Image (cartoon, rainbow, N blue to C red):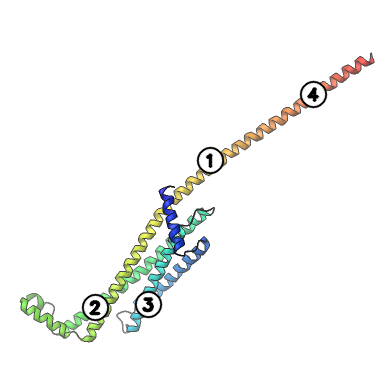
Amino acid sequence: MTPCDAVCLAAFIMAYQAGIPEEPSVLVNSISTNIQKITRLTSELQRTVSLLGTEQDTSYLRQTLQQKQQQGNHLAKETDRLMKGFAALPVGPDQRQRKLQKERLLNDFSAALNSFQRTQREAANKEREFVARVRASSRVSGGQPEDSFEHAAPFQRDSQMQAQTEAITEEDLRLIQERESAIRQLESDITDINDIFKDLGMMVHEQGDMIDSIEANVENADVHVQNATQQLAQAANYQRSSRKKICILMIVLAVVGVVVGLIIWGAVKN
């Protein structure tokens, strides 16, 4: 068993243990459906993200945003798992068709993930902008310009920092903590998507190896077919030659028989 075969076998065992269906058509349909869901979810997320920082930016809106982006991350991980299962299927007679399906699914999945992650980054940037505005507003309302920290003595700077902290209202503090928590979650989810992109990169590399293997097998099959065709042609030639020789032999025997018959008939008549 080659190292490649061992890796494929291990992946197939893992896919089986994970409960991934073994039927290629079922996997393809499941993956395609998930990609469509991610695409639709990304469109919904984009509309939600566009409302961040506006008058419609409410707790309900942020809760909806968090739910949708976590749903998208779950779909991305599930699709990644199914893609691994599809890549780990044993080699079959439809291998060339599966290769084309895998290539299409990889491209569609990568495109959907790119759009989804871009929306996640946009949401994280808007959350950071919101936190910066709240902090800036609190500094202004507290009467502590930011530049005053640079020219103050150390003990004065500590006093100013304490005054600024006290100037931040409980509501502002709650909003800042809430948004910073959302930012951390978004950054974690973005990292998860990056890991999936790494998996897809590995699959693309394996796809290239599989294509080379398939092409080599096709070339070998062509050689075998050509050899078989030549052998059949030679056999047909031998058969035609043999039939021709038999026909000639039968004609010769017939002529000899006629001559012998005429000789015998002449001898008897005399």
Q: Position of residue 241 (x, y in %)?
A: 69, 30
Q: Is residue 144 visible?
A: no
Mark 4 burial class by Cα count in 10 Å: few <14, some 14-19, many 20+: few
Earlier residue among tags 4 and 2: 2
Marks 1 and 4, Cα distance to the nearest angstrom?
Answer: 45 Å
Is 227 placed left or right of 192 in the picture? right
Q: Quadrant of residue 62?
A: bottom left
Marks 1 and 3, Cα distance to the nearest angstrom?
Answer: 57 Å
Disc tally is: 4
Earlier residue among tags 1 and 3: 3
Kindly report which numbered mark, 2 or 3, lies closer to the viewer in this rendering: 3
Q: Nearer the viewer, residue 68 or 12?
A: 12
Looking at the image, is 241 positioned above or below residue 90? above
Q: Quadrant of residue 205?
A: bottom left
Residue at point 40% right, 56% down?
204
- Label 4: which residue? 253
Earlier residue among tags 2 and 3: 3
- Label 3: which residue? 67
Q: Nearer the viewer, residue 115 or 173?
A: 173
Mark 2 burial class by Cα count in 10 Å: few <14, some 14-19, many 20+: many
Which mark identifies residue 223?
1
Is 54 placed left or right of 143 in the picture? right
Q: Position of residue 157 (x, y in %)?
A: 8, 78
Which mark identifies residue 131?
2
